Image: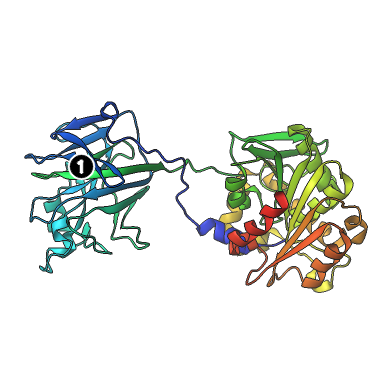
Amino acid sequence: MNHLLSLVLLLISSSLCLAQTYRPDLQNASLWNVFGRKVTPIHDGDKKAIRFNEQPNDGGMVLKNYEFTDGVIEFDVRGKNILQQSFVGIGFHLQDNKANSKVEIIYFRPFNFMNPDTVRRPRSVQYVCLPDYEWDKLREKHPGKYENKVNPVPDPDGWFHAKVTVNGKQIKVYVNHSAKPSLEVESLGTVTKGQIGLWVGYTSGGDFANLEITPARKKVTYGNNPEAGKYINTGDAAIYYEVYGKGKPFVLLHGGVYGYIDEFEPFIDKLAEKYQVICVGTRGHGKSEIGKEPFTWKQRAEDAYKVIRAVTKDSVAVLGFSDGGYTGFKLAAAHPELVKRLIVIGAGDRARIEESEKAVYTQELLLGQAREYFEGRLAIMPEPGRWGESLTKMNKLYNEDLLSKETFEKIKCPTLLMSGDRDGYLTAERMLVPYRTIKTAQLSIIPGCDHVVFYCNFPAVWAAIEPVLN
């Protein structure tokens, strides 16, 4: 079914996907190259920390054998409230640890945190990119752009927590777990990866503890990932699928027209931590072929069955959204030995199709609604010249292939039915038919959400799904 909202949200959403956190031991000298300072291990309360002594010129220590590109760097740091004698921070994208090294640095001037001088206080946190962009050059040419006050204001003589996020050119600095950044700048660096090091400035010492580095995970192009994608020939069409993770098999069946494997990104990321996730590309969508036969729900269920059996001999859990939900109904009814858990989102009774509900999808209509999106889809289709034919087949499927109690009565596995209470494609009455017919069914209505409930309120969706899986 048409769910433009889900794809619009998918296209405009941008987040930093993070991998496993690394917590290097600051007191293990074998992990670090020290320069320009002496380092002393200290313990301060529960903090296993290190202290740099005060010496002329910059100094610090660089983490060996670790390359950082994007991600999150967090640490606890303590300077002192003595004017021009406390500069403490973190360097990243370092190319070496010699004089005139290329490096980007975020550092703090604790003596400015509470400075009564209104000119000095906005110089509490600073970004520099050495050797080309020193603080004085940036301040002269871009006053106030690369430095700022900190909020909330820490004790200038005490420990405070710093978090630096690096996402491409975007760099943000947070203090003491604030949700709002104290500094937000665009990187001036010419390199995008390098080493990480703790840093202290001219004449400064400083204490550091609890360094954590969480690299950004490489962005996966779900639905067009050559590392995970495969084909199976069903006899009438080559069906594309992708597999992620390890464990018990979990099958994802996506929506139609606008839908494809990539709409399941929130699910894939979470499920792959525990399950072998099998993502089936419906024929006529993305990289799957169209075939010659008319589209039917039974055909889609059999396509999914053949993909599953190509991957595993085990029984599976199935989650189907919208079109994929109707495919899931058919699959569970036809192959009860295969489907041990069924989750259906945004699909219900199709005993009849009202005239006002009839599908009339055309190339012109869809390109007019979301040209850039569908041009991207056409670019990965194996048969882009047949897209109009595929839409005609889909219209016929939606308008003529009914699905109701005769299918629901055959489903014996535990089933969760879910929809948003504002779903424009699915009335509450249509959800009640499978709920009352499938004897093992549970019903979850997510308030305040339209058709694509997992983009509207994923935590609520996951909270409903988890007990069914367990």
Q: Give the percent coordinates (x, y) of residue 331.
A: 83, 47
Q: Is residue 312 above or below residue 189?
A: above
Q: Is residue 467 above or below residue 291?
A: below
Quarter of the figure that contains the N terminus: bottom right
The residue furthest top is: 30
Badge 1 is on which residue?
199
Q: Inspect the image, locate mark 1, and give the three-letter code of the amino acid beneath it.
A: Trp
The residue furthest front is: 45
Residue closest to the eye, 204 or 90: 204
Q: Quadrant of residue 82?
A: bottom left
Q: Residues within 10 Å of mark 1 (few under 14, many from 20)?
A: many
Residue 448 falls left or right of residue 118 = right
Q: Quadrant of residue 71?
A: top left
Q: Is residue 10 above or below residue 40?
A: below
Image point (28%, 64%), residue name: 152
Q: Does residue 231 show up? A: yes
Q: Which SS class for mark 1?
A: strand
